[in-house]
Amino acid sequence: MQRVEKMGLWERSYLPEILRGLIVTGSRFWRNLFIHTLHQLGLAKRLDAAMTVQYPDERWPYPDTYRGRHRLTLKEDGAVQCTACFLCATACPAECIYIEAGEYPDNPVEKYPVRYEIDTLRCIYCGFCVEACPCDAIRMDTGLHPANWGFSRKDFVENKELLMDRSRQLEAKGKEALYEEHVRQYQHV
Amino acid sequence: MEPLKLTIDGREVTTVKGKTVIEAAAEAGIDIPHYCYHPKLPIAGNCRMCLVEIEKMPRLQIACNTQVNEGMAVQTQSPKVLEARRAVMEFLLVNHPLDCPICDQAGECRLQDYYMAHDLKASRFEERKEHDYKREIFGPHVVFDGERCINCTRCVRFLQAVTRTEELTVVDRGDHSTIALFPDRVLDNPLSANVVDICPVGALTDRDFRFKVRVWYLKDTPSICPGCSTGCNITIGAYQNRIARFKPRVNEEVNSHWICDEGRYCFHRLTEVERLTSPLIRQEGGLVPTDWETALQAALSGLSAGAPLAGVISGRNTNEEAFLFARLMRRISSEAALEVFYQERPLTEVEKILKSPDRSPNFRGAREMGVISNGGFDSWLGQLIEGKFRGAYIVGEDLLSALPEGEKIKSALARLSFLVVQDSHLTATAELAHVVLPATNFAEKEGTYTNREGRVQKLNAALVPPEGALQDWEIFARMQREAGDRVSYSTPGQIFQTIANEVPRYGGLSYLRIGEQGAQPSDQT
Ligand code: SF4
Ligand code: SF4
Ligand code: SF4
Ligand code: SF4
Ligand code: FES
């Protein structure tokens, strides 16, 4: 790419352009400061200040197709829906799903995951696992952001109990409340 | 045998009288889809998957039970044939469950393969599917799923024709037709798990392998069963550096299509042990970790001062390892008494179909490499127990636990002035040693075995050895170097070249000639 770097005498004399730049940023800064102060005093609510979303106090609504943190869905009796077929793990491009299959002693039909773990540090939130699952056993419809802090790598590995519990939480509280709860931990950081 | 010519799919094929169309096609490299046909079993002709069109015959014929004729013109891909196969598939799938996600056969299932190749339509079946047993335990190794069975009777015919134990039969009719054990019988003959391999679908599955891993994750390595000196050809399926299963590999000269159950599951005993990851040396009564340099020096000087010297190597060590072992030991003491571990046990009639009475897959090879004494293993053991030796080097066998004379061996070993034990784990024998050297197991080695019949076959490494362990041949080579010899091997292949040059019976052999099917050198040379 060829950059246009030819400058006229005016630009090359340096100071005038610097001043012009300072005026642009300065006036934005003072305007925002002024309007934010008014907002704090409860005035001029209809004037918008800076266009930044004040996350986590404010946020944009996410589309329904947003791929958030995973959950393992449950059957009517509360058991895990997953049959440990490994199709999600096979489809996963990040190879971050670890499954160990087992057999119910009392149910001759089914196979189930004794262990089911997602290493969210490796996960790229592509959703292939959800597409691959023949049982609708894994979903990413929680609307939650991936965890972004922890004290060791282990903190980012989500196991079967946690993933199942997320389904129960979602059922009990609904998406909004779940999100609020999730975001609260960041508000105190 | 009268030769005759026919054409299959327009290609001219030469075969002999008496063959069936499916055999003639297979010889020419044309695979006719089939379920019930198996080259080693009597023909049943019940699945109808192998239908082909033959010129001048009004109706389609089954390729598995139609004999070839001079000038026959066979079509295996004509529209009529494809339509018939599609119909057969549809019938087979009428009552078939949608089990693929939980079925161990998925990924190597003929129903899946032929469905993808031929049918590919959604089910038109609207009635309720017939249900059947989902988990019928047939025996210690085999579990049956009645819904998945396509009644090809391969399992029944195997038990009639190969083992002649006849535990299974077909019961009931129509939709309800299924496979069942005869009353009061258990499918527990010594070759029972072969029915899992020949079942073309997931109806019979292996209890040991059940749900362990999906087959597409397996890393397959062609190798040789370490169970006995028959030397059955196998494929080792490994997952996450552990063995998940053995499958037989076809070799008409050795094991045909089968392996025995004992061999099939012996990897548990041989590989699932707590591995040694550093050499150990005896200090103040206890064994403490040390580095290789120190351990090898200590072993060498201890053995050098230990004449009369005894050496025993496991029958699971390769020819390459035995060759270097013999050289090393004779270098240390030209009088060293060397032997290969050997122990026989009685076999039943069914076991004799495949098994050899020993558990030393390479005893013949190791002897041919020079690990041999005058009287054989039993007399060697007798001398050891009598206290004829002062130093000993024991490789790969836990003499104490493997033999009935355990106690006597224990006191004999305790009386030795110096004992080196080389093994993959800390065995009872190793606990008595002055130096313990961590080595590899059969699945981590590359090399060759020579079976009871003298056939030389190749082992390949399926697993990566743990950090800290060395290959047996490497240990021998390093010790020889320590003793002042020039040894420049860097792969087992190079050792085998030396063997081919120096051991007359192996002249002219190479890894390339041995290939995947092994080679039988002539005994005369
Ligand atoms: S979202 Fe993608 S990367 Fe993450 S677990 Fe699923 S398939 Fe793997
Ligand atoms: S694809 Fe679905 S059923 Fe299969 S292992 Fe993954 S979550 Fe379980
Ligand atoms: S037998 Fe084959 S088609 Fe049937 S469930 Fe098993 S894998 Fe699927
Ligand atoms: S169990 Fe398998 S081998 Fe036996 S009849 Fe059924 S499909 Fe055939
Ligand atoms: S293979 Fe010929 S009928 Fe089954």
Image (cartoon, coloured by chain):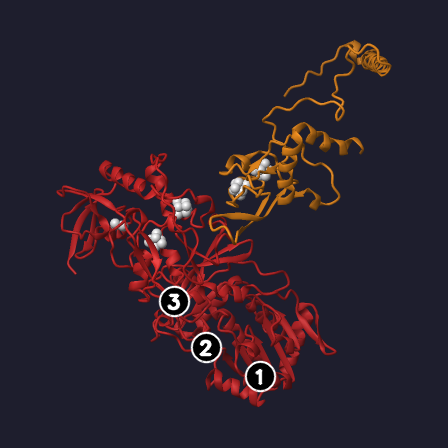
Chain colours: A orange, B red
Residue B218: percent from left, percent from top? 49, 52
Seen from the viewer's position, the closer of residues A34 and B497 is A34
- Given residues B211 and B254, the one toward you in this image is B211
Question: Does residue A122 appear in the picture of this structure?
Answer: no
Discs 1/3, front: 3
Label placed on residue B367: 2
Query: Which dot, 3 or 2, sits closer to the camera?
Result: 3
The disc label shown at residue B189, or none: 3
Q: Residue at x 14, y 41 (%)?
A: B58
**Tag 3 subunit:** B
Please provide percent x and percent y for residue A137: 54, 38
Residue A11's label in the rendered image is: none
Answer whether labels 1 and 3 touch (C-beta < 8 Å). no
The answer to whether dots 3 and 2 both sit on one chain is yes
Query: Which structural element holds mark 3?
Result: loop
The amino acid type of the residue labelled 2 equals Arg
Quarter of the figure with the N terminus of chain B? bottom left
Residue B119 located left or right of residue B487: left
What residue would you read off at disc 1? B409
